[in-house]
Amino acid sequence: MFDFKPTEDIISMSEFRTTLADCVARTAETHRPIILTQNGRATSVFLSASDWEAISEKLYNAEVYEDFLVGEGESERGEVYTQDAVKRLIDSDLKKLSGRGRTKKRTQKLAVA
């Protein structure tokens, strides 16, 4: 995803503070992150908002795909619930909630929503 250049993309925190505007422009233009160091050790990563958004979207999609694969495996193994069973579980949970100070009328609204 990134064409990382260690000689350009690793800088100290003090250099980052003095060149912040340039760092913002550079990450937006190159789409490469900047690794920030303190006392010679990497501590943070600075990247453009659009690149962060792209990374976040890929992570989300990977999680959704993983959930899909888990569900597919459960289905293949017969580890599924019928619609009636799901309704019974929901009704049971709603009854438990109503016992925690919720009124019956409020529980019925939850069931409808």
Image (tube, grey):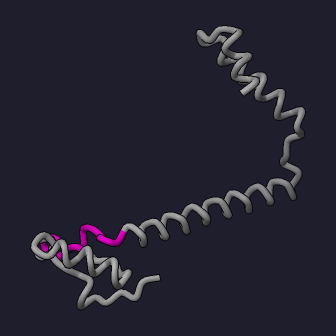
* Magenta range: 36-48
Task: State yes or no: residue 9 in magenta.
Answer: no
> Which residue sits at x=76%, y=24%?
112
Q: Does 28 sit left or right of 59 as displayed?
A: left
Image quadrant assignment for residue 12: bottom left
Q: Residue at x 35, y 85 (%)?
A: 30
Residue 55, image x, y percentages:
48, 69
When asked about the image quadrant of residue 45, the answer is: bottom left
Q: Seen in the image, is 16 located left or right of residue 72?
A: left
Decide which of 71, 83 is in the foreground and name it: 83
Taking 17 as reference, is 80 above or below it?
above
- The image quarter containing residue 76 is bottom right
Q: Main secondary structure of the magenta part?
A: strand
Residue found 80% across the figure and 59% down from its top = 72
Q: Is residue 43 magenta?
A: yes
In the foreground, 11 or 42? 11
Q: Position of residue 36 (x, y in %)?
A: 22, 73
- Horizontally, residue 40 falls left or right of residue 89, namely left
